[in-house]
Image (tube, rainbow, N blue to C red):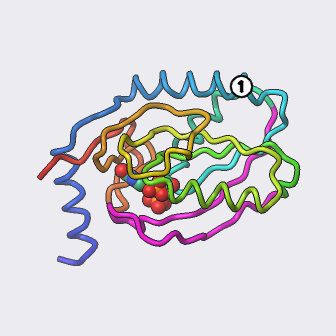
Amino acid sequence: MTMHDERRRDAMMVRERADCVCDAAQLADIYDRMARDITEALAEANPVILCVMLGGLVPTAEITRRLDFPFEFDYLHATRYHGETQGGELVWKVSPGIDLADRDVLVIDDILDEGTTLEAILGALAAQGARRVRTAILLEKSHARRDPALTVDFVGTTVPDRYVFGAGMDYKGYFRQLPAVYAVADT
Ligand SMILES: O=P(O)(O)OC[C@H]1O[C@H](OP(=O)(O)OP(=O)(O)O)[C@H](O)[C@@H]1O
Ligand code: HPA
């Protein structure tokens, strides 16, 4: 069996035993509410919306299709889990291509865990001259391992301190496409 086959088999076993922590109907309600709050804050701001690839892809698509006001759209790619369940060094793969000087920016990502990724993104966007950066994160993980000063403007919901996947998030590269969020079962 190749290494890829083993990872796939591991992912399938983990999915079978995982607990659903946010189902598709709950996610739809969360996206509706986030889109309403974002509209209230940004409809007149001519913002740039930035998707944090890869995990931000699904929440960004779900939220932006609920926004009926003009905005520009771009993405950035910063990653530090590299297909594993423990974070490592942050690698910047792609910076936003659009000029952010004096712009209102909304960053959309899937999860706030230890906060390392979001801190780096906020630093980079400030360095690019953004006027104001707001953040929309689908899930906030409940623990005390991040700087409490790091706050998010639009939070979907809170999840327990377990590795989660689905709705854009992967387990070892798999299952980003699942329409609900699952937590890996304790061993
Ligand atoms: O708060 P942190 O502990 O820094 O973790 C949060 C980040 O981790 C995930 O990205 P990941 O590095 O897994 O890349 P991916 O989006 O390609 O899955 C997630 O999409 C967030 O961007
Ligand atoms: O629990 C998680 N799941 C998926 N990606 C993540 N990135 C940080 N934490 C997580």
Task: Give the left or right position of residue 111, taking residue 39 as reference.
Answer: left
Q: Which residue is pictured at 59% across the width and 33% down the height?
A: 154
* Location of residue 11 (image quadrant): bottom left
Give the quadrant of the N terminus. bottom left
Q: Position of residue 39 (x, y in %)?
A: 71, 25
In depth, the one of 93 and 6 nearer the eye is 93
Q: Which residue is pictured at 20% across the width and 61% down the height?
A: 10
For numbered disc 1, what is the local secondary structure? Answer: helix
Q: Position of residue 111 (x, y in %)?
A: 47, 46
Q: Does the magenta run of residues contain 75? A: yes
Q: Does the magenta run of residues contain 133? A: no
In depth, the one of 2 and 107 nearer the eye is 107
Task: Give the left or right position of residue 3, taking residue 35 as reference.
Answer: left
Toward the right, the furthest residue is 102
Instruction: Find the magenta span and give its range.
Output: 70-98
* Location of residue 62 (image quadrant): top right
In depth, the one of 9 and 137 nearer the eye is 137
Q: Which residue is pictured at 81% across the width and 57% down the height?
A: 98
Residue type for callout 1: Thr
* In this view, 3 is above or below 173: below
Q: Position of residue 83 (x, y in %)?
A: 38, 65
Q: Where does label 1 land, which residue?
A: 39
Q: Which residue is pictured at 57% across the width and 54% down the height?
A: 118
Number of callouts in the render?
1
Task: Give the left or right position of residue 92, taking residue 95 as reference.
Answer: left
Toward the bottom, the furthest residue is 2
Q: Position of residue 128 (x, y in %)?
A: 79, 61
Task: Give the left or right position of residue 105, taking residue 64 as reference.
Answer: right
